[in-house]
Image (tube, rainbow, N blue to C red):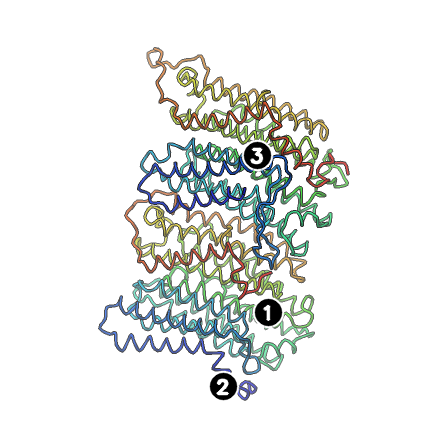
Amino acid sequence: MLALTIYLSFAGAFVLALMPKAWPRTPRILALLFALSGLAVALSGYVADYATGSVSVANLDWVPAMGIHYTLAADGISRVLVLLTGIAAVAGILFSWNIGDDEGDRPNEFFAFFLALIGGVYGVFLSVDLFLLFVFYEIAIVPKYFLIAIWGSTRREYAAMKLALYSFAGSAMVLIGLLAAYTTAGSHTMNLQELARYPFPIGFQMWAFPLVFVGFAILAGMWPFHTWAPTGHVAAPTAASMLLAGVVMKLGAYGCLRVAMTLFPHGLDPWGFSLFGIDSWRTVFALFAVIGIVYGAAVALVQNDFKFVIGYSSVSHMGLVLLGLLTLTQIGIDGAVLQMFSHGILAGLLFAAVGRIVYGRTHTRDLGLLSKLQLGKAMPFAAVIFVIAGMASMGLPGFSGFVAEVQVLIGAWKAFPWFAIVAGVGIVVGVAYTWRAMQRAFFSDAPAVDANGAIVPVPAYEPVTWSEMAGVLLLAGTSLVIGIYPRLLLDVIAPAVQSLPHALLTGGRP
Amino acid sequence: MNAVMNSINYGDLFRITLPETILEIVSLLALIVDLGWMRKSSRDTRMSTACWLGVLGCVAAIGWLIQHPDAGSIAAGSLVATPLVAAVKIGILTLTALVLLLSVTTEFSRNPGEFVAIVLLGTTGMLLVTAARDLLLIFVALELLSLSLYVLTAFAKSSAQSSEAALKYYLFGGMSAAFMLFGFSYLYGLTGTTNLSQMTSALSGSSVPLAIVALVLVVAGLGFKVAAVPFHLWAPDTYQGAPAPVTSLIASGSKVASFALLVAVTDGIMASGNSTYSANGNSWIVLLITMAAGSIVLGNLAALVQTSVRRLLAYSAIAHAGYMLLGIAAHTSQSGAAVLYYALTYALTTVGAFGVIGVVERSTGSDRLDAFAGLSRRNPLLAGTMLIFLLSLAGIPPLVGFWAKFNLFASVLRAPGSGHWGLVLVIMALAASAVSLYYYLQVLKRVYVVKPQRVDPMRITLLELTTLVAIAFAVVLLGILPGLLSGWIPLG
């Protein structure tokens, strides 16, 4: 049944692309309907299979001569991420409700690209056949380019091209690894589970693992390959930022876990020698992840563009995901998957608050300028949303971020105590940059003065629309529910993590 | 050759060469109809009559090939018919038919009859090249193909560019043909036969320095046909100067035929002795790999800075030839089939891309990147087909270009002889194809992102639109269901 999410999204993209352009306000309604039905399918699939393990979704011959099959299945990790995708898709459309109001918005194309991207993301999360997974992975790349280049803002063409080339370079690395694994294992199968059982030589895994891992981690925003992320997030239109941070970066992290680590678990083993305490690819990437956590947070602390703050915070939060995966402990990987979900929701909420609700009305994202606008009074709704999202994002108990970060840190404490401490520092810096941005943007005491020294009155901005309200309720509500009762997700994630290959749950001890 | 003369069974000859015969007859028919009955008609009518006649000829030949894909050979294997050869022939005929369909409304020529006749003669050459397994036949067929293309390149008589392109094409082509013939003469001298399969056994085990010289010369000749570095110099100018349908023909059918020939020749000669380490095999492989690497790097890098879309596609064609040469160097039967699959699907996509370029040129008078600005608003459907063609060339799934690349590179990695170089070159090729996305996106950026100066709808005839949409549909369909062709060209 979950396969319907993929078909619905692509059908929506197809319908919207071919629909006549005479009614500019219809596409968003249609797109919302398609996204809502996708979410309904994802949610009912989630509820129906709550207590079951991996469920097979589809299995058809595709190119049997080459061992390639159309195989879809969903374990707990997939189902959680499919649910996230459904929520992010609906929220993204709700926050794009202005597309179609103006001449030259090209709403048909916008929502067609949007839904095509969503379809690709659903597909990646559900694929078991690696060839199929790769196909969906690449389908998700191209629409991003157009969404940013056509509907974006600041340096959009540069940012879009950078993002497309980074993604494509990453996927070329992944393809090399997959081709090598496929031919090494005798070209009989592209099925992930069957390939994972093939004993690849250690030497092979030692070069294939970092290649595939980095290929996916580029999209997950791993330092030092993260530079596409802030520029891409800033340039993208709100809905695309929400998707980029919300689900596309998760594709990368998902690939790291599902493909690189599952296929080549011995690539994580120690090299047999140690250089400055670094003795395996696992330590190298964990180090990168920790640097990403601290670096992203530190850079976010000094940004003047509101969206850059959130762009860098995404790099920081995705560092936590990667660190959690590399702990190779049940609790760390649980936390990483939960963090993927949580960050997907919260990044969406933050980008919506900044990109749509604030920027859509004030037309500036400069924190210096915003601090003079007294938004706390002029836009109390936006202030409340940002406070909620910011609190959740800095890891306040009661929201989803807290549970996830605690689990990742516990896992990291077992695996890399020093890294756990540094990551903890990064989380503290996260409090600082959120606080700073919040204070500057909404609660600055300095009112704007005109040339004569008179205080400029608080301007009246257009009120919050129903679509914005609905989107906020959806995202903030999800985060709150998960924060209060995380078992709703953890009950599904934990068994799936348990059934990962044994080598991934040993905490690095053979 | 004596054996060839004496042992011909004319019934077999007729049966095996019937597609070629049909094309010959139709090409004469096109001349007769055009020059005999239609002198007084308008040029448009004459052009469409001639083109449709040509299309019918291609369809008839395809029909015969589908009905009789049987294996056989005549004259001691000088001319062969296998299911694979039949598949490639069908592919070439389809490509020619598509090129003719896209030529119906072109205005570059005042001599429609001659145009179609020469296109069909060139196609006959392609078909013969595909089936020939004898040095003399190969040379004659290649010359038939090449001479037709030289003439066609110069067919826009009022355009100086067209003449310049033809002259460059002709001079380079003539020289490379001379090289190749010289190489053939050495091969004949060494082995005493012109037949490829007999040559294989005669060469086996021996490692004569002269054989290597001969191979280098032959490779030079074939490298010119497929526009591989360092024999690529004609390609950008010819692609830019020739009339759009002729460029498609050079980029599609001619490429396919040349690669089919390369597969046949390398099959024959590299297999001599135990392929992997025989001296001949090795020097071939080194040569092919060098050419492939050079083509991949130079084609992709040079394409980055082009402002003319035709030149851009010319350099991308050089890069694609490089990818295919990797498959040739792997020289297994799988990689041979993978190369043919790649060549056919690449050619199909290219015909579509040049079809779009032709339409844009007619409307804007230019093939520069900026001429494509705002195409998505001026003609959304046309823009959509261009999107599909270029993304397929870049190798983005689920389009056929990705599948062809996957199949080709998998076959290269699998080949027993590719142990030393296979992985390195596949990595290089995939890295280069990541680079290639940049220049394809340069075109697509104009099509979808840049605001146009003119927003009036771009005019396109129903026939052109139908043809382009059909090609785009095929590119998508073959990408989603790659097994569709597996009855013709084996996969895996």
Label 2, secondary structure: give it. Answer: helix
Does residue A290 appear to the left or right of B75 in the view shown?
right
Q: Chain of mark 1?
A: B
Nearer to the camera, B289 or B445: B445
Tell me residue B253's x, y (percent): 45, 66
CA distance separating discs 2 and 3: 74 Å
Q: Secondary structure at mark 1?
A: helix
Seen in the picture, residue A492 relative to B443 is either above or below; the reply is: above
The amino acid pointed to by label 2 is Tyr
How many labels were placed on the picture?
3
Which chain is indicated by disc 2?
B
Give the crowd class for mark 3: few <14, some 14-19, many >=20 residues within 10 Å: few
Which residue is labeled 2 in the image? B10
Residue B379, image x and y in percent? 33, 50
The verdict on a common chain for dots 2 and 3 is no
- The answer to whether residue A311 is left or right of residue B284 is left
* Residue A354 numbered mark, or none: none
Q: Amino acid at mark 3?
A: Val
Q: Whole-Å distance between the Cαs marked 3 and 1?
A: 59 Å
Q: Residue at x 61, y 37 (%)?
A: A77
| Amino acid at the residue labelled 1 | Thr
Q: Residue placed farthest to the bottom in the image?
A: B6
Q: Secondary structure at mark 3?
A: helix
Whole-angstrom CA distance, mark 1 to mark 2, is 29 Å
- Please name whichever residue, B340 or B183, is drawn nearer the observer in this view of the structure: B340
Do the residues at discs 3 and 1 belong to one chain? no
Reading the image, the residue beneath label 3 is A47
Task: Kindly indicate the quadrant of the structure image that contains residue A102.
Answer: top left
